[in-house]
Structures are given as structure tokens and as C-alpha cells.
Amino acid sequence: MMQFAFETARLAAIRAFAAPARCPHCDDWMVAPVSSEFVEGGEIRHYWECESCGETSCTTIELG
């Protein structure tokens, strides 16, 4: 049972990593980040630039 819980959490992290995001400024979809970085300690940061309004934003995914 513990293995299932671990795999479910891992799958959720993978889905979050690949998921598009909505612009926090105009709410339009942003499909791919401009860049991404792994931060020591188990975090991924995506940097976005909205094609609709031109504003930039950052999203964070916790991996652990």
C-alpha cells in the first residue's frame, strides 16, 4: 500500500511539471515556460512570459 501512495505522489509531480499554466495577469493559457531551473532541495521553477499580455511570472513545483 505504501508503494501505491508513493507512485501516486510521483505521478502528480510529473503531471504538474508538464502542465500548462494560466497567466496570473490576464488568465490566458501559457503552454510552455521560457526557462526552468532545478533548485537544490527538490523544487522546480518555471519562468513564463504570456504571449497575450507580455507579462512575466514564475511557478514552483515541490518534488518532495
Image: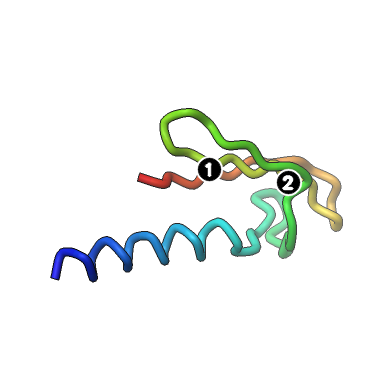
Question: Which numbered disc, 1 or 2, marks the residue that appears first in the sequence?
Answer: 2
Spatial separation of the CA atoms under disc 1 and disc 2: 11 Å
Question: Residue 31 appears at what percent x and percent y?
Answer: 73, 63
Q: Relative to residue 62, is residue 26 drawn left or right?
A: right
User: Residue at image x 54%, y 41%?
Assistant: 44
User: Residue at image x 42%, y 47%?
Assistant: 63
Q: Relative to residue 57, is residue 15 drawn left or right?
A: left
Q: What scheme was used to colour the molecule?
A: rainbow
Question: Residue 14 appears at what percent x and percent y?
Answer: 49, 61
SS type, badge 1: strand
Q: What is the number of the mark on residue 60? A: 1
Answer few, some or many: residues within 10 Å of disc 1's Cα (few below 14, many 20 plus, some between 14 and 19).
Answer: some
Question: Residue 37 appears at what percent x and percent y?
Answer: 63, 37
Q: Amino acid at mark 1?
A: Thr
Q: Quadrant of residue 22?
A: bottom right
User: Residue at image x 32%, y 66%?
Assistant: 7
Q: Quadrant of residue 58?
A: top right
SS type, badge 2: strand
Question: Residue 34 appears at what percent x and percent y?
Answer: 78, 46
Q: What is the number of the mark on residue 46? A: none
Q: Amino acid at mark 2?
A: Trp
Q: Which residue is mark 2?
A: 48
